[in-house]
Image (spheres, rainbow, N blue to C red):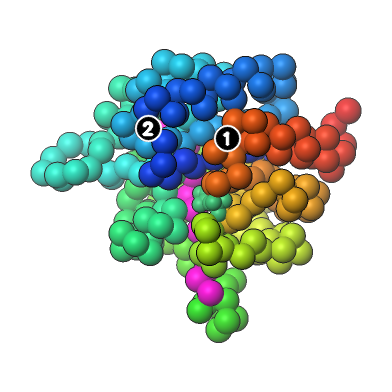
Amino acid sequence: MRRLDKIYLGTNTKMYKSIADTVEFLKRLDDLTADISRNLLELFVIPSYTALDQARRTVKEEYIKLGAQNMCWEDEGQFTGEISPLMLKEIGINIIEIGHSERRHIMGETDEIEKKKVSAALRHGFTPLLCIGETLEQKNYKISDEILKIQLKVGLNEVTEQEAKSIWIAYEPVWAIGVNGIPADEGYANEKHGIIKDTLIAMFGKDIGSDIPVLYGGSVNPQNAEPLIKEENIDGLFIGRSAWQADNFYKIIQSVLPLFKEKRKIF
Ligand code: 13P
């Protein structure tokens, strides 16, 4: 089965939900989505560190994969305030979100740092979810494609073809994210996903490169989720605000699933 025969739908809860909020959210999401075949849907939630342990006890990974919002590249050492891959492994999480725009632009992370985190995540058997995207300034200079290629070529520099089989990418234009974000229109997002896919194919070959899921994120909402998912190059959605209520997230899931099946001709 190709990896892209599934739709990838997930949320990053950023620094919003407490442990209790996360558990309540996951229980509700788990109940609502229990009947959806996981052959068709890869559902994931990326809560705050403090909620991860309880989150893992709340839902089974066959139904909802869990991720960490960040991770140190070293296993142990003098890294005050950092969380090691071994600590995350102990909890039993699946995904490591790497290079979210808030990590790059508020915390000052660079492509070289993301590269080390991608390699560490792979070494420990996690799925790295590498987030990339251009700023508004870069978009205005018309260098978005170059920026995306640099972020991929540096971030995935040490990844082998074999390892590339477990990578996910999220395209999250910086200008589209958060309360002040303007969502990318579906045509623009599809075009950039095309650039990302071409770059992945150039790096890992046609078979492996074209099978890497590329998710769109940045002000996804109940209105734009459908047109986005109809686009050929958009394999899933990485949602913030519009998914933080389980019932709202479920409505988006329900609305895009049939469109995804139609697109991939799955009956
Ligand atoms: P919003 O959907 O709230 O813009 O956030 C997207 C995001 O940052 C997902 O990682």
Residue that appears at 72% across and 17% down: 35
Residue that label 2 marks: 18
Q: Are marks 1 and 2 in contact (CB under 8 Å)?
A: no
Q: Is residue 116 above or below residue 105?
A: above
In what element is the residue under mark 2? loop
Q: Residue furthest bottom?
A: 141
Q: Which residues are magenta?
A: 125-136
Residue that appears at 47% across and 41% down: 13
Q: State left or right for residue 267 relative to residue 201.
A: right
Residue that label 1 marks: 245
Q: Nearer the viewer, residue 168 or 225?
A: 225
In what element is the residue under mark 1? loop
Report crowding for label 2: few under 14, some 14 to 19, many 20 or more residues within 10 A (C-alpha). some
128 in magenta: yes
> Label 1 vs label 2: CA separation?
14 Å
Q: Quadrant of the C terminus?
A: top right
Three-letter residue code for mark 2: Ser
Please provide percent x and percent y for residue 99. 41, 54
223 in magenta: no
First in sequence, mark 1 or 2: give its number.
2
Specify the label residue 25 is tagged with.
none
Q: Nearer the viewer, residue 257 or 125?
A: 257
Q: Residue furthest left?
A: 78
Residue 191 figure quarter: bottom right
